[in-house]
Image (cartoon, helix red, strand yellow):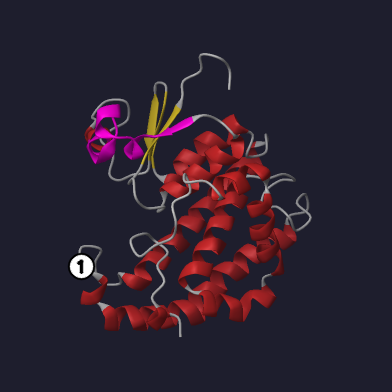
Amino acid sequence: MPTGAPTYELFYWPSIQGRGEFVRLTLEAAGVPYVDVARLSAEQGGGVQALAAILAKVDGGGPFFAPPVLRHGAVTLSQTAAILQYLGPRLGLVPDDEASRLQANHLQLTIADFVLETHDTHHPIASSLYYEDQKPEARRRSELFITSRIPKYLGYFERVLETNPAGGGRHAVGSALSYVDLSLFQVMAGLGYAFPRALSRISSRLSHLVALRDRVAAEPAIASYLASSRRLPFDLQGIFRHYPELDP
C-alpha cells in the first residue's frame, strides 16, 4: 500500500469470527495493514461503542444495518459481498476483467446465502431466541440442511472449481488466489467445525474443495494468520457452531 494511503478499518463484533472473518481473511491474505477496531480497548477508540457509532453514522454511506463495516479513507460500506467487491481489485484478489469480477461477486453472494442457511440451523425460529429455546426446530432444520443443503451448495462450488478453465480446479475465479477462494476456505473450515460428521461423509465427492481448503490454509500469509491470536477460534457464539446433537 502506498505510503500515506489510508488504513483499512474493519468494524465487527470483537469476540466472534462471524461474517467479519471473510473480510479479515482477505486483508490478511493481501498482507495490508488494517485495524480490527472493535477489538481495541475503549481507551484506544475501540470496543463495541465504536461499532455502534459507525453503524449509526448517517453520513458517508450510513446508517448501516449491521456489521461488518469497512472504512477506507472517505469510503465506508457494509455487507460482506460489497466489501469484498471493493477490496478485491485493490488488493489483487480478483482478476482484472469485468466478467471475472462480476462472476466473483455472484459467487460471493451465493456463499452469503449458504452462510445464512448455516446460521439458521441453530437459530431456525429467531436470532433473538437462545438456541435452547428452539432445539427441536434446530434438530429438524439441521437434518434437512445435512441431507439436502450441504450437498447442494458444496456440489455447486465443486462444479465451479471443476469448470473454471483458467483455474485448473484450483481456483473459483481466474487463475490465481481470489477472495472467493478465501471465502470457500472459511466455509469449509466452518462446516468442518460445526458439522464434522456430515462433511466427512461427503468429502470424497468434494476433492477440489477439500484441496482448496488445505491449499489456502498453507498459504504463508494465511498460515501465519491462523497461528496468530488475530484468528479468533470457532465457538458457540458465531455462525458456525458445533452442537453434537445436530450432527449425528
- Seen in the image, is 75 located left or right of residue 102? left
Q: Position of residue 88 (x, y in %)?
A: 57, 37
Q: Is residue 208 magenta?
A: no
Q: Quadrant of the N terminus?
A: top right
Label total for image: 1
Name the residue rendered at 46%, 20% in the picture: 6
Residue range highlighted in magenta? 34-52
Question: In terms of image quadrants, where is residue 55?
Answer: top left
Name the residue rendered at 28%, 80% in the picture: 135
Q: Position of residue 233 (x, y in %)?
A: 44, 56
Give the camera-side residue of 221 and 164: 221
Question: In terms of image quadrants, where is residue 154?
Answer: bottom right
Q: Position of residue 73 (x, y in %)?
A: 42, 21
Q: Residue furthest top?
A: 4
- Seen in the image, is 130 located left or right of residue 176? left
Instruction: Examine the rendering and report whether any part of residue 52 can be seen.
Output: yes
- Seen in the image, is 17 located left or right of residue 179? left
Instruction: Examine the rendering and report whether any part of residue 103 can be seen.
Output: no
Name the residue rendered at 63%, 40% in the picture: 94
Main SS, magenta region, reads helix
Q: Position of residue 87 (x, y in %)?
A: 53, 35
Circle 1 residue: 129
User: What amino acid is found at the position of numbered circle 1 in the picture?
Assistant: Leu
Question: In terms of image quadrants, where is residue 211?
Answer: bottom right
Please tell me whether mark 1 sits on a helix, a strand or a loop: loop
Note whether 7 is above or below 189 in the view shown.
above
Name the residue rendered at 42%, 67% in the picture: 118
Give the camera-side residue of 28 and 44: 44
